[in-house]
Amino acid sequence: MCGGIDRSTFPELKAGDEKFISDVTAQFGSRERASALWVNYGFKLLKQNNYGMATRRFDQAWLLDPTNAEVYWGFSTVLHDRDRGEECEAMRMMDKTLTLNPATYQGIYPDAGQIVTLCAIRDKTLSPEHASKENG
């Protein structure tokens, strides 16, 4: 994540990431707990339509725990909510969410259904067979 940049090739970014991870892990007891807190903050920012800061919090949550399904749900929601026609990219993030077996009580599955439907409607280049394969 993090804008698709391989941050490990930039020593200053790598050092900053390592310090961030170390600091919040010490503060919150584990990377997983800190990641969950950052996801919650990201969703609060998303409710305020602050897409840039929400994305940043989801990026930080991903740095802390790339196996946290809710991180990808956050990315998917940003891509959907900012209404730039990115439903199919949102669907790819939602696919990642679902492969990580998220908790079922949080509304991920209704969001997934909506995003898949919107991608199928928006992407006119998909053949009917490909669209049903992508979305099924």
Image (cartoon, rainbow, N blue to C red):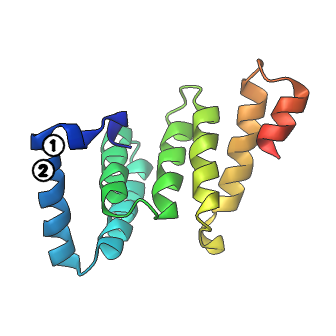
Q: Quadrant of the N terminus?
A: top left
> Is 128 displayed left or right of 32 in the figure?
right
**SS at mark 1?**
helix
Residue at mark 2: 16
Q: Nearer the viewer, residue 107 or 25?
A: 25
* Residue located at (15% from left, 43% from top): 13
Please tell me which residue is depicted at 79% across the width and 42% down the height of the picture.
Answer: 135
Q: Nearer the viewer, residue 50 or 108?
A: 108
Give the crowd class for mark 1: few <14, some 14-19, many >=20 residues within 10 Å. Answer: few
Name above or below for residue 9 compared with residue 63. Answer: above
Q: Residue furthest bottom?
A: 29
**Residue 7 % position (x, y):** 24, 41
Residue at (63% x, 64% y) in the render: 107
Residue contact between numbered discs 1 and 2, judged by CB atoms under 8 Å: yes
Residue 37 image point, x, y percent: 33, 69
Q: Marks 1/2: CA distance?
A: 5 Å
Dot 2: within a 10 Å radius of its alpha carbon, few (fewer than 14), some, or many (20 or more) residues? few
Residue type, label 1: Leu
Task: Name the outermost residue toward the front.
Answer: 9
Query: Tag 2, which secondary structure?
Result: helix
Residue type at the position of mark 2: Gly
At x 76% / y 18%, what residue is drawn? 125
Relative to residue 123, is residue 36 drawn left or right?
left
Determine the image quadrant of residue 36. bottom left
Q: Which residue is mark 1?
A: 13
Point out which mark residue 1 bears: none
State whether residue 123 is above or below residue 110: above
Left or right side of 56 for 19:
left
